[in-house]
Image (spheres, grey):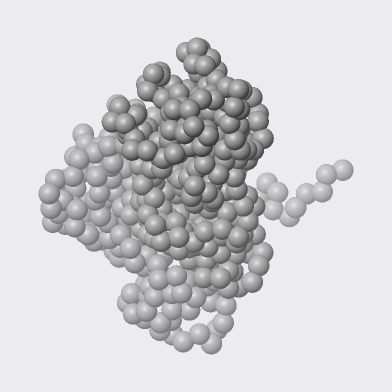
Amino acid sequence: MTEHTKTDGLPGFEPQVLERAKPRSERMAGDKIECNACPVLCQITEGRSGACDRYANIGGTLVRVDPVILLKKAVAAGDNPVVPFVGRQQAAEHSPTAQEAAGAAAPSGSWSGDLLQADEVFVTGVGSSTTYPDYKPAPFIVSSKAADVDMVTVVTEGIFSYCSFKIKIDTDRYLGPEQANIRYKGEVVGHVTTAEYGSQMLSLGGVHHLTGGSKKEGRLTAEIMQLLGNKQAAEITIDGGSQIVVQAGRAPIVNGVEEQRMRVGCGSATIGIFAKQVFGKADEVIVVDDHITGVLTEHQAGRCLDIPPSGVKIRGRKSTPGRYFQVANPGTGWGGTDIADPLSIIEGWDAKVAWPGLQLLMTSTTGEHAAWFVLDENLVPVQMPMPVEVQAVVDRIGENCEPSLTTVLFLGGAGGSLRAGVTENPVLLTRSIKHALVNVTCGGAPAYVWPGGGITVMTDVSRMPDNSFGTVPTPAIVAPIEFTMRLSDYEALGGHMEYVRSLSSVLEHGAWHNDGAPAQRKWMQQPDINAWPAAVGPMLG
């Protein structure tokens, strides 16, 4: 027999929903406020901010100190000052419906309230405040129209313990062994992961570094994640490897040298790309590469061109014709190896095949290193000035290299409690995203949704507004996240419909609540590279 609770079927027993909990200590000074925007629960004196520097006690009210960032498709000159919300204090005592009715005049410099432009305005999570402790609706649940369709965007700042940054460094240089620890100010904050084509990949952060180690490890992990997320530079060292300065959108600085080029391909690929261009200009071409060194006369491209063998013997492990592995140790020399003399990878020449006068081009995969040799009477390579037409091919290799950049990707798990700020039945949000009904963005930037369970999203921080990331001392990362969908779909997934407010109301009065809400707003222009969040579906994996 099913056991019933005392409240089953009885009206009037719903819990009272408070904006804030009672202070933990009744002895807290009267001029202090206990901030409940994160689990730390700072007690903040009037005029001061909490440990995160994101919330402050302003005149006895807890305020999110940064302005909430609003995006427009086009921003005119002088259109982006920080503007206070109108009547937030007055509206604070009222429900969202009451705020709608307030209808106060917009301050100077604010949006005109023209709903015809509603599909050109997007409220981001940057500076929007949080749902913590995740039993209350998101600070902004904004209705608007897009192409005459009723839409809604649920906006919040998520507190992420399960998150990391994936760092893609375009370089041939050897940065360190796979799985090696990465340190920031001496603490381990991540590890080297698998190399990709032309890039070395790092993983920084993650819940184990944030919460599983010492307090110092967690604090420094959050610190470097905030730096990199906010597009600032950070210096890291890899155990058994390099010292690197990384910054989103900038060339990495490896051991004090700024990288210039991303390789055009591995040695084998370089042979294939440029075989026809070097045909008739050299008898042999060797492209030195840490991973796959290419030899033209043995390579399939050379065979297609019917180039006769040269008799060169290469050190390392032969994989397939014209492709050699492990010709040297990894390093910062030629082609990501540890060699400064390219001839060190040549074991010798077959005297029955090679001939005096044989012309040999050796180059790296970026063209930064290149040399021209001619065999003497004893079949010994002698370096000579490089012919102009051969130099042109080397230059072409360099021309085809893309600039070396550092890319910082935020990877966060949003499948947890912040969903309660969107709906009373969180799994419906997850399912709606997977059914392509809900677009997910971070600060208005597109977020790739990983396949599988939960809501795990990945975003390029360079496409987000500046200073999108913060931290809380738990420690954890704070990042903006927005869910945009049709209003009808929001109602169907059990959204907090009573907290949906018009865009004009939001622009005038700010968040629906008055405890820890932002008091100001600021316009920014949506980067051209980002699709308008309400006009596209989610990027599903």
Q: In this view, does 264 lie to the left or right of 13?
A: left
169 and 492: which one is in front? 169
Relative to 222, residue 252 above or below: above
Q: In this view, does 529 lie to the left or right of 20?
A: left
153 and 408: which one is in front? 408
Check the image and name the residue furthest to the front: 377
Relative to 275, residue 166 above or below: below
Image coords of residue 330 (percent x, y): 57, 48
Image coords of residue 314 (percent x, y): 60, 34
Q: Work out which quarter of the rendered image holds the N terminus and state it.
A: top right
397 and 318: which one is in front? 318
**Residue at x 33% of width, y 46% of height:** 123
Relative to 323, residue 3 above or below: below
Figure quadrant of residue 510:
bottom left
Q: In this view, does 349 lie to the left or right of 259?
A: right
Figure quadrant of residue 92:
bottom left
**Residue at x 64% of width, y 71% of height:** 214
Image coords of residue 419 (percent x, y): 54, 47
* Res. 153 visible in picture: no
**Residue at x 34% of width, y 29% of height:** 390
Q: Work out which quarter of the rendered image holds the C terminus and state it.
A: top right
Image coords of residue 218 (percent x, y): 58, 67
* Res. 295 visible in picture: yes
**Residue at x 40% of width, y 36% of height:** 372
Q: How many labels does the image show?
A: 0
1 and 267: which one is in front? 267
